[in-house]
Image: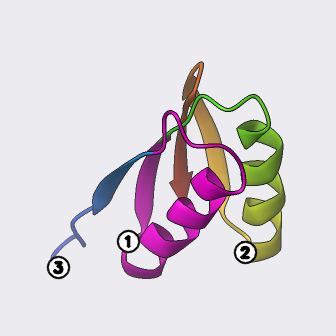
Amino acid sequence: MMNEPSAEAVVDARGMRCPWPALRLARAMRAEHMVLLLADDPQAAREIAALAALQDWTVEIESEGCWRVTR
């Protein structure tokens, strides 16, 4: 039995203001099962959490300004 490779894309949204980090994340999640999002807007955490809740994604905080999102 072959394991499915874990696809991970990196979305660098640093310097972008919300809603752009969430929009970039949503676009990447259409094609990937796992995305590492980098964002420095203070509102990004709330936007990402709301988007993930709507889409039933899992969000893990890797570090400040860095989230791993999986579906």
Label 3: which secondary element:
loop
| Residue nearer the viewer, 2 or 17 | 17
Q: Residue 55 location, x and y as percent?
A: 72, 75
**Which mark is first along the chain, 3 or 2?**
3
Q: Residue 67 location, x and y as percent?
A: 55, 38
Q: Do the residues labelled 2 and 3 touch (CB within 8 Å)?
A: no
Q: Which residue is drawn at 79% across and 51% down?
A: 47
| Residue nearer the viewer, 71 or 25 | 25
**Which mark is first along the chain, 3 or 1?**
3
For marks 2 and 3, give the one nearer the viewer.
2
| Vertical order, 34 against 31 (above or below) | above
Q: Quadrant of the N terminus?
A: bottom left
Res. 55 mark: 2
Quarter of the image where one finds residue 16: top right
Q: Residues within 10 Å of mark 2 (few under 14, many from 20)?
A: few
Q: Residue at x 66, y 43 (%)?
A: 17
The part of the chain drawn in magenta is 13-37
| Vertical order, 35 against 40 (above or below) | below
Q: How crowded is mark 1: few (under 14 residues within 10 Å), some or many (20 or more)?
A: some
Asked if residue 15 lies left or right of residue 9, the reply is right
- Residue at the far top in the pictured view: 64
Label 1: which secondary element:
loop
Q: In the image, what residue type sits under mark 1? A: Glu
For marks 1 and 3, give the one nearer the viewer.
1
Q: Which residue is drawn at 43% across and 55% down?
A: 35
Gap between marks 1 and 3, in whole Å? 22 Å
Q: Residue at x 52, y 34 (%)?
A: 15
Res. 32 mark: 1
Q: In the image, what residue type sits under mark 3? A: Met
